[in-house]
Image (cartoon, helix red, strand yellow):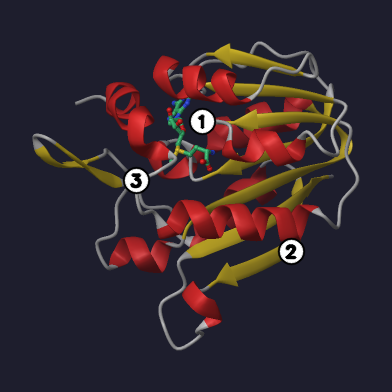
Amino acid sequence: MSIENAYNVWAEQYDSNENKTRDLDKITAIEILSNYNFENVLELGCGTGKNTKWLLEKAKKIIALDFSQQMLNKAKEKINNNKVTFIKCNLLQPWKVNNEFVDLITSSLMLEHIKDLDFIFKQAYLKLKPSGIFFINELHPFKQYNGSKARYESENGTEVLEVYTHHISEYLITAKNNEFILIEIQEQFDNEDENEIPRLISFVFKKN
Ligand SMILES: C[S@@+](CC[C@H](N)C(=O)[O-])C[C@H]1O[C@@H](n2cnc3c(N)ncnc32)[C@H](O)[C@@H]1O
């Protein structure tokens, strides 16, 4: 099944099924982004709007992009606010957003579905204002090395989505090649237990 269709099916239960990755993303994204000021935000792969909702507390304008119509429908059920524009699009095509329009781009749990990180960093550079921030929260590659993949249960059994592993070095090199500076890197553990493999990796990059 294509990634887009898999999320169209997952949408119905995405907010309610057990999902430690989704829950830890929300906690850590709020924690990290509370230290930054922003007005115009571009959210990549906004899904059901889990993060759009709290980003709205600080943002003046949010453009939230996703290619799954069903995920977007769930987001629109939750959020009816003229500060937010939801757009259905494939992030592997040039983003139809004005250049140098936003001061924050966020990407939570989306890049594991993207093979070509370089394209995403190139688009992000174009859309960010000078010194804008690119925040990434993603399934930690160590988890991926151990076989973790985005998945959900359906009446047809377990649906495992198409994913790509990005090594930490790949994020850092791709960011550097696209004129981003690393501001923060964090590893997020379940129950703050640092003896376990970290679940998430968080990056804050700044447009140079
Ligand atoms: C795991 S969900 C994360 C949703 C949300 N960011 C969150 O943290 O709950 C990944 C989202 O990325 C979207 N996505 C994946 N690949 C995409 C692509 N190429 N273009 C647009 N959206 C994409 C999916 O449709 C899905 O809604």
Q: Closer to the N terminus: mark 1 or mark 3?
A: 1
Nearest the viewer among 13 and 192 is 13
- Residue bearing the label numbered 2: 184
Quadrant of the drawing holding the C terminus: top right
User: How far apart in space, not on screen, are marks 1 and 3 (Cα)?
Assistant: 22 Å
Quadrant of the drawing holding the N terminus: top left
Which image quadrant for residue 127? top right
Q: Is residue 57 left or right of residue 184?
A: right
Which image quadrant for residue 115? top left
The reply to whether discs 2 and 1 touch (Cβ–Cβ < 8 Å) is no
111 in relation to 197, above or below: above
- Residue bearing the label numbered 1: 48
Residue beneath the point at 55% across and 30% down: 119
Residue beneath the point at 65% across and 45% down: 177
- Residue bearing the label numbered 3: 164
Amino acid type of the residue that numbered disc 3 sits on in the rendered structure:
Tyr
The reply to whether discs 2 and 3 touch (Cβ–Cβ < 8 Å) is no
In the rendered image, is residue 182 in sight? no
